[in-house]
Image (tube, rainbow, N blue to C red):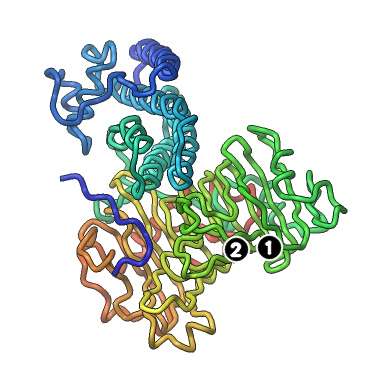
C-alpha cells in the first residue's frame, strides 16, 4: 500500500614524488571549474562534455582500469577519467585525486548552468524543486571542495571519516534534488535532468575509490554492504567532536548562558522574530553564536540556518514553552524538503530545550517539523512533533539526546549518520488504513557511512494510539533505499510494535537482501524476536562487538566532537 512517499529509486543492474603532480592536477581542476562556470551562463542548454555512461569512448590505461574496477559505474568512471588532461600518465594514487577533481568540476558546471535558468516560468512545485536543487548543488560543491582539499593534504584517521561523510552527503543531496522533480514535467525538469546527468554516479565512484584506498576494517563482522563507520564517543557520553566549551554550554542552566541575540515576541529582547536573529549570525564563524528564544509560539516563513551560518546554538525555555511551528505540507505544492518548519545545514548546529512542530495533520501526508543537514549537529532535550515525515535527518553526522519525537508514517527519515540516545519515540494514531513506520532510512550506496542508530531509547505509543492499537500496526522501519541501515539497541519496545518488527516498502521485495536492519538486547513486550521477519538483510545481533559499531563512539565518531557541546552521552553500549 502506497501511503505518501515517492517510490525508491531502482537499483542499478600519498608519495612525495607525486605531490607536485597532484598539486598541478588540483590547480588545473580549479581552472577547469572556473572556465566551465563562465561558459555555463552563456548556455541555456549546456553542451559541455559529460561522462557518457552508455559506452567506452576509448581504451583506458591499466591504472584507470584498476581504479575503475572498484566502482559501481565503471563506464562513467573510465570516460570521466580519460577526459581529464594528464590522466593517461597518472598512477592509481594520482587517479584518486583526479576523480575528486572531475566530480567537483561537473558539480560546479551543473550549479552554474542550473542557476542560469532561474528566470524561467515555473509552477509552485517545480519552483520548490528547482530551489531545492540550487541549494543542494551549492552544498555539494562545498562538500566536494573540502573533500578534495583534505585528500590533497593526505587524509588519515578522522580525516578519512570526514571525507566519507562529505561525499555521502553530496550523494544524498543529489538524490534529494532528483526526487523533488519526480512528480514534475516540462522544460525545466528536462533541463535540470540534463544538468544533473551522471552526478550521482560520479560521487558514488569517488566514494568507492576513496573507500578502497582507505581500506578500513572497522566493520569487520558486518556484511560488506554495511561496513562504513558512523560516529565515535567519549567516556562522558558525548561525541568526540564536541569541544569543552560546548559541552559546558549544554549543561549550563539558562540563567548562566550569555546569548548573543535574544528573541522575544513582546519586544523585550534583541529582536522579535527568529528570522531577524538568524540574519545577525556571522558567516563561517568559528565562535559559538547563541540565540536565546524566549517562551512563545513562533510561526515564520522559511526559517533556515544555512550552510554559511556555522556554530549556531538555539536555546529555548524548555519543551512546550518555546515552540517553533508551521503547517507547510506536500499538498501546498511543495517538496518534502521544502515543508520543514525549521531547517539547519550550517555545521556545528545545536538546539536545546525547544519544541519543533508541524501541525499539518496526517491527512496532509509529508509535513516536516525539523530538517537537519548540518554536520556535527546536536539536538538536546527537544520535542519534534508531527505526523508523516516529522524528523528529516537529511545528511551528515548528527546526535539526539533526551528528545521526544512524535509521528506516524516514516516519522524519522533521511540519510544522515545519526544516533538517537535516551530518546522517546512516540507513534501516534494514523489515518484509517495506514500503518505506522518509525524509520525510513534512505542509504542508496554501499559505501555511504550513513544510517540510523537508536540506542537506549523508549519506543512508545501515544494515548490515542494506545486506545486503538488493535486497529493499527506499528513497525520499527521500512527501507526507503536499497542499502537502508537501521539498528535498535538496548531500547524498550512497547507492545504496539508488530511482532514482525519491520515492514516491506509498499509490499514489494525491494532492498530485503541488501538492507541492514539489526536489533540488540532490547526489552519490553514488543522486543521478542521469535516472529521477526526472515529477510536476508535482517539480523538479531548477538555480538557486542558488532553492536558496538553502531554506538556514538564508533558510528558517528562522537567522542571527537560531542564533548565540546556539553551534552551528556554514552560512547559505548553501556548505559
Residue topped by disc 1: 323
Neighbour tally class for label 2: few under 14, some 14-19, many 20 plus, Cα within 10 Å: many
Answer whether residue 154 is visible to the viewer in this image: no
Q: Earlier in the sequence, mark 2 or mark 1?
A: 1
**Among the 4 quarters of the image, the one containing residue 327:** bottom right
Name of the residue lying farthest toward the right: 268
Count the labels in the image.
2
Q: Nearer the viewer, residue 381 or 83?
A: 83
Indicate the position of residue 366 as horizontal and vertical percent values. 45, 60
Task: Find the distance from the CA under tag 2 to the CA under tag 1.
Answer: 7 Å
Q: Report whether 464 appears left or right of 440.
A: right
Residue ID at (19%, 31%): 53
Looking at the image, do the residues carrying marks 2 and 1 touch, with CB atoms under 8 Å apart?
yes
Mark 1 burial class by Cα count in 10 Å: few <14, some 14-19, many 20+: many
- Residue 357 disc label: 2
Instruction: Please tell me whether residue 152 is drawn above or below residue 364 in the rendered image.
Output: above
Residue toward you, 558 or 343: 343
The residue sitting at 22% across, 29% down in the picture is 76
Mark 1: which secondary structure? strand
- In the rendered structure, the answer to whether residue 289 lies left or right of residue 81 reads right
Q: Residue at x 47, y 54 (%)?
A: 418
Residue 561 image position (x, y, % from top left): 56, 46
Q: Quadrant of residue 505?
A: bottom left
Q: Position of residue 476 (x, y in %)?
A: 38, 70
Amino acid at each position: 500500500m502506497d501511503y505518501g512517499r515517492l517510490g525508491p529509486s531502482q537499483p542499478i543492474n600519498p608519495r612525495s614524488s607525486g605531490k607536485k603532480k597532484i598539486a598541478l592536477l588540483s590547480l588545473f581542476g580549479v581552472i577547469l571549474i572556473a572556465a566551465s562556470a563562465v561558459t555555463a551562463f552563456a548556455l541555456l542548454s549546456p553542451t559541455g562534455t559529460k561522462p557518457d555512461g552508455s559506452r567506452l569512448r576509448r581504451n583506458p590505461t591499466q591504472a584507470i582500469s584498476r581504479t575503475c574496477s572498484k566502482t559501481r559505474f565503471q563506464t562513467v568512471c573510465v570516460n570521466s577519467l580519460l577526459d581529464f588532461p594528464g590522466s593517461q600518465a597518472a598512477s592509481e594514487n594520482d587517479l584518486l585525486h583526479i576523480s575528486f577533481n572531475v566530480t567537483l568540476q561537473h558539480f560546479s558546471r551543473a550549479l552554474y548552468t542550473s542557476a542560469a535558468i532561474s528566470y524561467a516560468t515555473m509552477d509552485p512545485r517545480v519552483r520548490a524543486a528547482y530551489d531545492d536543487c540550487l541549494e543542494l548543488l551549492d552544498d555539494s560543491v562545498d562538500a566536494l571542495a573540502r573533500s578534495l582539499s583534505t585528500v590533497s593534504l593526505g587524509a588519515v584517521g578522522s580525516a578519512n571519516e570526514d571525507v566519507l561523510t562529505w561525499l555521502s552527503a553530496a550523494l544524498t543531496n543529489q538524490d534529494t534534488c532528483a526526487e523533488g522533480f519526480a512528480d514534475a514535467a516540462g522544460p525545466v525538469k528536462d533541463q535540470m535532468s540534463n544538468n544533473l546527468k551522471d552526478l550521482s554516479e560520479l560521487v558514488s565512484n569517488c566514494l568507492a575509490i576513496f573507500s578502497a584506498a582507505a581500506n578500513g576494517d572497522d566493520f569487520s563482522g558486518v556484511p560488506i554492504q554495511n561496513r562504513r563507520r558512523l560516529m565515535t564517543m567519549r567516556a562522558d557520553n558525548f561525541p568526540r567532536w564536541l569541544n569543552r566549551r560546548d559541552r559546558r554550554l549544554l549543561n549550563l542552566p539558562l540563567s548562566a548562558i550569555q546569548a548573543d541575540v535574544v528573541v522575544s515576541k513582546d519586544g523585550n529582547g534583541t529582536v522579535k522574530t527568529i528570522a531577524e536573529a538568524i540574519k545577525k549570525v556571522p558567516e563561517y564563524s568559528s565562535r559559538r553564536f547563541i540565540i536565546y528564544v524566549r517562551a512563545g509560539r513562533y510561526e515564520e516563513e522559511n526559517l533556515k540556518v544555512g550552510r554559511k551560518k556555522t556554530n549556531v546554538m538555539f536555546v529555548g525555555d524548555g519543551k512546550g514553552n518555546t515552540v517553533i511551528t508551521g503547517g507547510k505540507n506536500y499538498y501546498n505544492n511543495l517538496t518534502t524538503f521544502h515543508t520543514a518548519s525549521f531547517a539547519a545545514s550550517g555545521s556545528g548546529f545545536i538546539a536545546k530545550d525547544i519544541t519543533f512542530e508541524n501541525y499539518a495533520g496526517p491527512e496532509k501526508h509529508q509535513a516536516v517539523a525539523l530538517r537537519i543537514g548540518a554536520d556535527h549537529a546536536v539536538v538536546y532535550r527537544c520535542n519534534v512533533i508531527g505526523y508523516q515525515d516529522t524528523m528529516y535527518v537529511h545528511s551528515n553526522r548528527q546526535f539526539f539526546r533526551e528528545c521526544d519525537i512524535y509521528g506516524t508514517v516514516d516519522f524519522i527519515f533521511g540519510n544522515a549518520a545519526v544516533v538517537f540516545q535516551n530518546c522517546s519515540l512516540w507513534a501516534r494514531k494514523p489515518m484509517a488504513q495506514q500503518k505506522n513506520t518509525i524509520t525510513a532510512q534512505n542509504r542508496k550506496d554501499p559505501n555511504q557511512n550513513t544510517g540510523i542508530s537508536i540506542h537506549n531509547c523508549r519506543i512508545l505509543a501515544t494515548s490515542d494510539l494506545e486506545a486503538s492499537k488493535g486497529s493499527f500496526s506499528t513497525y520499527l522501519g521500512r527501507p526507503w533505499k536499497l542499502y537502508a541501515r537501521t539498528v535498535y539497541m538496548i531500547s524498550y519496545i512497547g507492545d504496539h510494535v508488530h511482532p514482525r518488527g519491520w515492514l516491506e516498502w509498499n509490499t514489494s521485495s525491494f532492498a530485503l537482501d541488501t538492507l541492514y536492519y539489526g536489533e540488540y538486547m532490547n526489552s519490553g513486550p514488543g522486543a521478542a524476536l521469535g516472529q521477526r521477519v526472515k529477510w536476508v538483510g535482517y539480523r538479531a545481533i548477538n555480538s557486542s562487538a558488532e553492536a558496538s559499531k553502531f554506538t556514538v563512539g564508533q558510528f558517528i565518531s562522537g567522542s571527537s566532537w560531542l564533548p565540546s557541546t556539553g551534552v551528556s552521552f554514552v560512547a559505548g553500549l553501556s548505559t
